[in-house]
Image (spheres, rainbow, N blue to C red):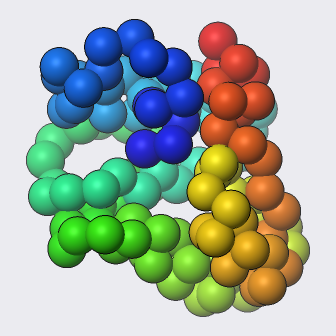
Amino acid sequence: MNVIGSRPDGWWRDRRGAMRSLASSLAAYAEATGDEVTVVFDGRAFHVGDQPIAVRFAPGGPNAADDEIVKVVAADHEPRSLTVVTSDSALADRVRAHGADVIPAGSFRRELD
């Protein structure tokens, strides 16, 4: 959600549409770079389209998505190979503690564009 929120383009009027659009952009990014991509969205699961990326949902309130991201990083056999995109300093600290790298959401959004 940090990536979606990094640009005030009215995404809040169609939150699911913004999520679908990001998933599509991430799929194109994954195809272009060969990187494996996982996106974690806040809220209840819904169909975001058939994307060649891993899409997870974290229902449950404040920091649920952050907690899910930390679980993904902590469970990885090579967390140092992972890069987490976030502008949330607390989340950045948590995933760095497991060895992951961090890129700010705005920087990554510009890369997607």
The reply to whether residue 63 is in sight is yes
Residue at x 35% of width, y 60% of height: 56
Q: How many marks?
A: 0
Residue 34 at what x, y percent from top left? 74, 39
Q: Left or right: 73 with respect to 100?
A: left
Front in this rendered view, residue 19 or 64 = 64
Q: Left or right: 33 with respect to 16?
A: right
Q: Left or right: 23 with respect to 83?
A: left
Residue 32 at what x, y percent from top left? 71, 24
Front in this rendered view, residue 35 or 106 = 106
Q: Quadrant of the N terminus?
A: top left
Q: Quadrant of residue 110?
A: top right
Residue 108 at what x, y percent from top left? 71, 32
Residue at x 32% of width, y 33% of height: 19
Residue at x 42% of width, y 56% of height: 40
Residue 72 at what x, y percent from top left? 55, 77
Front in this rendered view, residue 70 or 47 = 70
Q: Quadrant of residue 93?
A: bottom right
Q: Left or right: 39 with respect to 63?
A: right
Q: Quadrant of the C terminus?
A: top right
Residue at x 53% of width, y 36% of height: 3
